[in-house]
Image: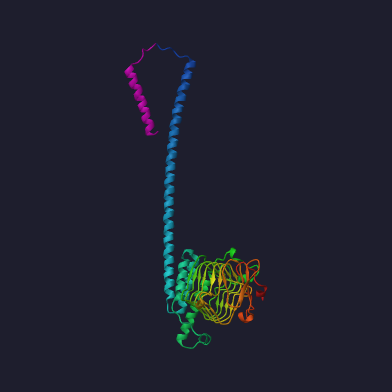
């Protein structure tokens, strides 16, 4: 019984005694004997009163017991929740410490004098990023920073016939380390296995590829890249300004979601951008292309403009699609014109928006065809690159591969 109930009973009893004493008792009459029926009724009333009081006491006791049980249960839940939070925090702290230790050790390995140790550091960083998505951007930046380190690539003769000196051996080993770093970046920028677009029925990007790291950005400004293969990669945002591409540079079938900067780059070999889709701006002014520049079948969703590029080899833009401005030259600024030493092929290219500005090199004009404007040659084959572009352009994302790729 609670204290409030006891206090109420005591107050009621005290009030009754005080009123009885103050008013006095009425004169007593001679009691009459109760018959059997009256005694039974009185007995029933007494039993009912006792039962009611007992029920009230039992109800109050049960309520108090239930309330105590609820309080104990709530306390136990709070203690359990707190214990779980502490355990989760300890696990998180332990995981972060382990990740930090692995990261620090891997970075130290990348600075080691032995190439095999540097390779181990690269693959340790890759594994760490694969298992911890929140660290993928940091790992990508570390790998990009390694590729931006000063490096003097070996000549083709030295690669084909390396000397016996330790200097050549170290340079060849460093070449392998840098190529491994490039392959790690390319592997995790693809949404599907490499070469899948060339096969009918191959799994597409929508089915997912566990190695893909979405959203990471690249900063390879001034990097030296060796025979790099970024085909079918998906670039969120990338920076290649001032980079030097040694050997063949492949971006076939790549997708550039945002800005792609290739200003002041140098392609010492061929540059394959066939089947590429540019959703953002492409900045490529002052670039040098030492071999074939292949942009066949590419699609440009923003303004396309060339300025002061130098194309030593053939330039192919056949079957490309331009959704906005297409400015290959600018008559108002002749000093900014690119130089096509071996001609340019624009056959089959199209400009979809008829209201956009189109500035073409000499020998090329546009013709209305109902669904935009087609770019055609008016000066003969001398304005095209010489033969050699027999391989079909790489299929863009979502396109079916050309049957000639099957061979």
Magenta residues, dominant SS class = helix
In the rendered view, does 53 fall on the left or right side of 386?
left
Task: Look at 44% across and 48% down and name the residue there.
Answer: 77
**Res. 371 image quadrant:** bottom right
Pick out the residue farthest to the top: 30
The image position of residue 274, as x and y in percent, is 59, 74
Which is more toward the observer, 252 or 389? 389
Which is more toward the observer, 31 or 64? 64
The image position of residue 362, as x and y in percent, is 59, 78
Question: How many numbered callouts?
Answer: 0
Which is more toward the observer, 29 or 98? 98
The image position of residue 181, as x and y in percent, is 49, 74
Where 53 falls versus 262 (above or below)? above
Q: Is residue 22 visible?
A: yes
Pick out the residue farthest to the left: 22
**Res. 232 image quadrant:** bottom right
In the rendered view, does 136 fall on the left or right side of 350?
left
Q: Is residue 155 magenta?
A: no
Task: Look at 49% across and 16% down and name the residue there.
Answer: 37
Where 248 falls versus 6 (above or below)? below
Q: Which image quarter holds the C terminus?
A: bottom right
Task: Look at 51% across and 70% down and name the residue there.
Answer: 260
Q: Is residue 6 magenta?
A: yes
Q: Which image quarter holds the N terminus?
A: top left
Task: Look at 45% across and 33% down and name the residue there.
Answer: 59
Q: Is residue 385 visible?
A: no
Which residue range is magenta in the image? 1-29
The image position of residue 160, as x and y in percent, is 53, 86
């Amino acid at each position: 019984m609670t204290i409030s109930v006891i206090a109420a009973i005591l107050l009621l009893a005290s009030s009754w005694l005080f009123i009885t004493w103050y008013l006095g008792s009425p004169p007593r009459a001679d009691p009459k004997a109760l018959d059997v029926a009256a005694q039974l009724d009185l007995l029933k009333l007494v039993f009912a009163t006792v039962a009611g009081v007992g029920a009230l006491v039992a109800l109050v006791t049960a309520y108090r017991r239930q309330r105590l049980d609820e309080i104990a249960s709530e306390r136990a839940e709070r203690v359990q929740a707190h214990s779980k939070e502490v355990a989760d925090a300890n696990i998180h702290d332990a995981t972060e410490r382990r990740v930090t230790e692995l990261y620090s050790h891997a970075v130290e390995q990348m600075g080691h004098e032995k190439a095999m140790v540097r390779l181990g550091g690269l693959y340790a960083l890759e594994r760490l990023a694969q298992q911890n998505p929140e660290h993928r951007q940091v790992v990508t930046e570390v790998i990009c920073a390694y590729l931006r380190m000063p490096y003097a690539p070996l000549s083709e003769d030295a690669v084909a016939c390396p000397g016996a000196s330790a200097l050549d051996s170290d340079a060849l080993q460093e070449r392998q380390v840098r190529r491994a770093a490039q392959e790690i970046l390319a592997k995790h920028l693809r949404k599907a296995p490499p070469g899948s677009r060339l096969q009918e029925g191959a799994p597409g990007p929508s089915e997912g590829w566990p190695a893909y790291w979405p959203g990471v950005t690249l900063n390879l400004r001034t990097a030296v890249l060796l025979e790099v293969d970024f085909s079918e990669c998906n670039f969120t945002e990338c920076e290649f300004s001032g980079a030097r591409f040694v050997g063949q540079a492949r971006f076939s079938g790549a997708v550039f979601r945002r800005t792609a900067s290739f200003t002041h780059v140098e392609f010492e070999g061929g540059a394959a951008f066939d089947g590429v889709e540019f959703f953002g701006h492409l900045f490529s002014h002052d670039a040098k292309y030492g071999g074939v520049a292949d942009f066949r079948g590419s699609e440009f969703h923003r303004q396309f403009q060339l300025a002061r590029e130098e194309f030593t080899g053939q330039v192919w833009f056949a079957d490309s699609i331009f959704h906005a401005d297409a400015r290959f030259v600018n008559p108002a600024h002749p000093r900014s014109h690119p130089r096509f030493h071996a001609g340019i092929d624009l056959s089959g290219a199209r400009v979809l928006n008829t209201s956009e500005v189109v500035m073409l090199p000499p020998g090329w004009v546009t013709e209305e065809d109902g669904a935009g404007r087609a770019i055609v040659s008016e000066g003969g084959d001398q304005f095209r690159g010489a033969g050699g572009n027999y391989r079909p352009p790489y299929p863009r994302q979502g396109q079916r591969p050309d049957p000639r790729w099957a061979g």
